[in-house]
Structures are given as C-alpha cells and as structure tokens.
Image (cartoon, helix red, strand yellow):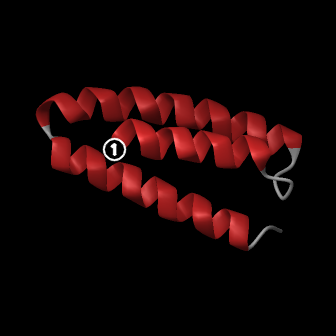
Amino acid sequence: MLDETLAKLETNIRQSHAIRPDDKAELLQLLTRLQAEIASLAHTHAAHAESVAGVAERSMHEVLRHPE
C-alpha cells in the first residue's frame, strides 16, 4: 500500500500541468527523501508510515486542486 501511494504521488506530480517544471523537480526530490524516510519508518512503525503517506497524498491532492 505504501509503495502504491508513493508511486501514485510521483505519477501525479510528473503528469500535472498545474505545477511549474522547477517546482516539479523540487517536489520529486522531496518525494524521494520522503520515500526513504517512510521505508525506514515502516520497518518499526508501519501504522505511522501509512499515516505519513496518507498525509502526503492528501496534501498533493490539495496542491493540484488549487494551483497558484
């Protein structure tokens, strides 16, 4: 589930026309860091890792709904 959520976030970022290219690059870099942190967290606190991934998914949804 975590991998699916993070892969979905990456796809949404890459395919979005509402995000400027430089912002996309930054978001993808941050997502890579988040993936590493969640993978580490998942080994000891799976429920927390799921929660963090869910928050990231909802945040991205809001960004795509309200582009500036």
Rendering coords of residue 46 (x, y %): 18, 42
In the drawing, does residue 17 fall left or right of residue 64?
right
Q: Amino acid at mark 1?
A: Met
What residue occupies the far bottom of the structure in this picture?
Answer: 66
Q: Is residue 60 above or below residue 43?
A: below
Residue at 45% across, 46% down: 5
Query: Dividing the image into 4 quarters, which one contains the N terminus?
Result: top left
Asked whether, in this view, residue 28 is left or right of residue 45, the answer is right
Residue where numbered disc 1 is placed: 1
| Of 16 and 59, the residue lying toward us | 16
Task: Where is residue 45? Give x, y as percent.
Answer: 14, 40
Residue located at (77% from left, 46% from top): 15
At label 1, counting other C-alpha atoms closer than 10 Å, the crowd grade (few under 14, some 14-19, many 20 or more) is: few
In this image, 1 relative to 16: left or right?
A: left
For label 1, the SS is loop
The residue shown at (40%, 36%) is: 3
Q: Residue at x 40, y 26 (%)?
A: 36
Instruction: Judge whether 45 appears above or below 19 on screen.
Output: above
Where does residue 48 sit, x and y in percent of width and height?
A: 22, 49
Q: Quadrant of residue 2?
A: top left
- Where on the picture, by quarter, is residue 55? bottom left
